[in-house]
Image: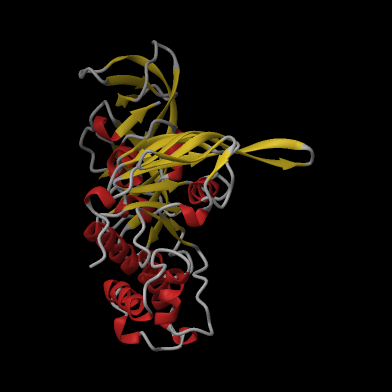
Amino acid sequence: MLRCQGEDAGMLNVKNLRKQFESNGKRINVVDGVTFTVGAGQFFTLLGPSGCGKSTTLRCIAGLEKVSSGAIEIDGDVVASEGHHTEPNQRPISMVFQSYAIWPHMTVLENVMFPLSYRGARGSSQEEKRARGMEALKMVQLDHLADRDAPFLSGGQQQRVALARSLVVRPKLLLLDEPLSNLDAKLREEMRFEIKELTERLGISTIYVTHDQAEALSMSDQIAVMSDGKILQLGSPREIYLEPTSPSVARIVGKVNVLQGKIAGAGTQGDEVEVSLPSGGLLRCRRSKGGVNNASVSVVFRPELVRLKLDDGAPSPSMNSMRAQVTRVDFTGDHLKAYLETSDGPVIAKLAPDLILNVGSDVTLLIKPEHCVAQ
């Protein structure tokens, strides 16, 4: 049975990692001082837009790129630092790429067994290698297709073959570089669950690279949000989504509303602050960092945490409410997206799909203090 638990499970430390490339005679920091730790058995995700440095970080961990400075340790062994580079095949890792790189002239089993020819099973008999290959295929539920020619596989099956091939060498650390981006939406959702369930069952430490916030939030134990080669915020999915430390993080991780205001004083709770909006209204918000009275701040809140009260003539709360007019309504099936115009700027609300809302309607927007953050 393939196991990556206990003393076999990986521990990764990335310390002040920098990777520079030269462009037009200038040195550019593609990865700029990145530091994080992945615990044994942890599912860790690097999340960010294209060009943010997440894949380059993964390639440095894999040994496909030499680091410019900093250090990478796996289970206490330094595998990369300035002047030191352990080759990829000497690192206890496996990697699944965005392109699955399935050999078309081989069967499914031969594809999975291929790494055993040069790593992880030197000296083993062909029967032993076949047994390990079948074991890996069984883990991804493809053992019944072992003798099928690789070109006759669906996209999802090819993804599973690539995953089985990465596990057959029994790595301490599994690296996944946007492995689901070539699949359709329904299959992506299914494979998210399968990958998470498999890595949890094996107890294998995993680093996952994606630009898809749904993948990151649903699969990860910890997420590092990256932009311009730096980590903007590191935390649990709940922390990253509900407590973003900047508007940039909030925008990378899903849709967000941002209004501008100034600190008007302390709120009723220790971590709250009152924010005065340009229209004169007040919002009581959680504070993500310090600030003095009259300091400019951004108020950030998620569309799905907005509540609407239709104009029925009854008085509305004076705080954490805003008058608004509906300018557009989109029905998407699982929710209703309402575009609202307030005196302090546009706001989007994500509402129940059975709500009847008409363009031009006057409404009151309500947002709880714990659901908005002053930054």
Task: State the residue at coordinates (40%, 70%).
Answer: 123
Q: Which of 159 and 80 is in front in this view?
A: 80
Image quadrant occupied by the N terminus? bottom left
317 on left or right of 248 = left
Task: State the residue at coordinates (48%, 40%).
Answer: 226
Q: Where is residue 191 in the image (x, y as percent from the top left)?
A: 34, 67
Q: Where is residue 61 in the image (x, y as percent from the top left)?
A: 48, 47
Please, is residue 3 above or below residue 241 in the view?
Answer: below
Q: Which of 33 and 8 is in front in this view?
A: 8
216 on left or right of 178 = left
306 on left or right of 260 = left
Q: Position of residue 310 (x, y in %)?
A: 26, 45
Q: Where is residue 131 in the image (x, y as percent from the top left)?
A: 30, 78
Can see residue 175?
no
Q: Which of 279 and 116 is in front in this view?
A: 116
Image quadrant occupied by the C terminus? top left
Q: Which residue lies furthest to the top in this view?
A: 293
Please, is residue 89 above or below residue 247 in the view?
Answer: below
Q: Which residue lies furthest to the right in this view?
A: 25
Please, is residue 341 above or below residue 158 in the view?
Answer: above
Q: Which residue lies furthest to the front in this view?
A: 123
Can see residue 369?
yes
Task: State the residue at coordinates (49%, 57%).
Answer: 89
